[in-house]
């Protein structure tokens, strides 16, 4: 009889396909339409006497447009008011306007912006405009008049329809560092730690494992057998799960999560890898089936995962009759402590359930009292 020990099979882990991260962008442009009009009033001092104190500019702009405006000047004994008169196209439009008094060489010496305009009443019509004291206009210090000429520049900017460019997708290659880290798993000559799982070997790097898991960190920081031999025996772990765990450590990806979620969840808890455990728990909670629901609750209860317990309890409550018929149900119903915890989670869900309210019809009470528990009601 041949008693020679079967040699351990060494398996090199293949690096997953290079993936791309995605960045998207789009552009929104606020379109505006600008109109300006320069109005010059010569012999300004005669206006009050020969125009009944009122004069109008020409309508502008001259080119075909949905908007037509003109300016109105009203003079009283002490004040001059300048109004914007909408002829057409101003209703419902968003706009910002500026009125400037121009001095010598056309330089603005006084400006009034949209929020500085007032509602001026002219007969039965209200206009936006400004009122200026005549003493201010004629004061040599203010330079508003060029001789007996008043120059006004009116500018208005309308908001037009905004335009959006389509969303642009930009694929960003994975960082070269991540690529290089992934290739380290392909060549065992670079690895200085051997992980033996189900008579097969995986290779990794001591420093990387120490940084990724406090359990590995403690293992290699003390004179343990693993630290001295640089070999870790993992007889209670799944080989596929440990391979995916290494891929997560080196690349941040778990390409076969759907195949190893439960085993990887257990491994992540054992080696205190919180992010990986959360990833697996989220997957399990989002992909429950009637056949696996009871086992999933036992698993989440065993590892004190409240979020996963709640997700599974809600699923069981929604599919209770079907779950009771599965083989895994005996792992709950045959253990009072797990049964109590499941019922308590369902009770916490209460009226938020979309399924018929289990609290109202007394199902929880009747079932739980069979175990001698207190009433939920």
Image: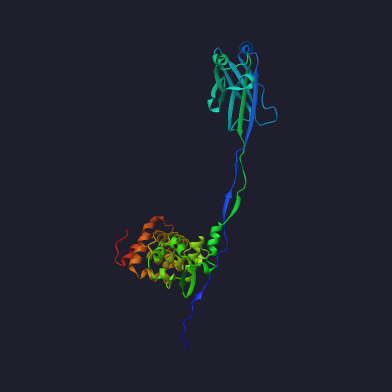
Can residue 172 be seen here? The reply is: yes
Residue 308: horizontal and vertical position, in percent? 42, 61
Tell me if residue 298 comes above or below residue 123 in the rendering. below
Residue 223: horizontal and vertical position, in percent? 38, 68
Residue 77: horizontal and vertical position, in percent? 55, 12
State how the image is colored: rainbow
Residue 24: horizontal and vertical position, in percent? 58, 50
Tell me if residue 227 comes above or below residue 49 in the rendering. below
Tell me if residue 148 comes above or below residue 312 in the rendering. above
Q: Residue furthest top?
A: 49
Please give the name of the residue rendered at 49% of the width and 79% of the height, measured from the top-left corner.
7
Q: Residue furthest bottom?
A: 1
Which of the 4 image quarters holds residue 31? Answer: top right
Image position of 313 (left or right of 146): left
Q: Residue furthest right?
A: 63
Please give the name of the residue rendered at 33% of the width and 66% of the height, measured from the top-left corner.
337
Viewport quadrant of the C terminus: bottom left
Residue in front for this viewpoint, 227 or 120: 227
Residue in front for this viewpoint, 183 or 125: 183
Tell me if residue 81 comes above or below residue 5 in the rendering. above
Residue in front for this viewpoint, 211 or 30: 211
Image position of 97 (left or right of 268): right
Q: How many marks?
A: 0
Can residue 321 be seen here? The reply is: no
């Amino acid at each position: 009889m041949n008693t020679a020990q079967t040699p351990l099979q060494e398996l090199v882990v293949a690096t997953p396909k290079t993936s791309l991260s995605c960045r998207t962008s789009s552009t929104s442009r606020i379109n505006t339409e600008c109109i300006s009009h320069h109005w010059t009033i010569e012999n300004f001092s005669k206006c009050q006497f020969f125009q009944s104190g009122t004069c109008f500019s020409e309508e502008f702009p001259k080119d075909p447009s949905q908007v037509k405006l003109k300016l109105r000047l009203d003079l009283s004994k002490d004040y001059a008011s300048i109004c914007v008169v909408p002829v057409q196209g101003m209703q419902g439009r968003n706009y910002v306007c500026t009125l400037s008094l121009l001095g010598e060489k056309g330089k603005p010496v006084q400006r009034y912006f949209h929020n500085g305009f007032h509602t001026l009443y002219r007969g039965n019509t209200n206009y936006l405009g400004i009122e200026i004291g005549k003493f201010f206009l004629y004061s040599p210090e203010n330079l508003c008049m060029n001789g007996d000429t008043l120059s006004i520049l009116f500018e208005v900017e309308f908001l037009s329809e905004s335009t959006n460019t389509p969303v642009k997708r930009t694929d960003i290659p994975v960082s070269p560092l991540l690529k290089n880290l992934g290739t380290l798993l392909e060549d065992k000559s670079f690895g200085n730690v051997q992980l033996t799982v189900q008579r097969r070997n995986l290779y990794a790097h001591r420093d990387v494992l120490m940084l990724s898991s406090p359990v590995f960190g403690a293992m290699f920081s003390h004179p343990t057998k693993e630290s001295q031999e640089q070999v870790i025996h993992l007889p209670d772990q799944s080989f596929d799960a440990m391979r995916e765990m290494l891929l997560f450590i080196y690349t941040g990806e778990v390409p076969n999560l759907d195949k190893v979620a439960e085993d990887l969840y257990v491994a992540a808890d054992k080696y205190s890898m919180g992010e990986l455990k959360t990833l697996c728990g989220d997957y399990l909670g989002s992909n429950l089936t009637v056949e696996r629901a009871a086992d999933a609750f036992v698993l989440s209860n065993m590892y004190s995962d409240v979020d996963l317990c709640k997700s599974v309890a809600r699923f069981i409550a929604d599919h209770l009759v079907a779950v009771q018929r599965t083989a895994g149900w005996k792992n709950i119903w045959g253990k009072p402590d797990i049964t109590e915890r499941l019922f308590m989670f369902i009770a916490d869900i209460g009226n938020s359930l979309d399924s018929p309210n289990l609290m109202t019809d007394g199902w929880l009470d009747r079932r739980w009292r069979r175990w001698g528990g207190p009433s939920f009601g």
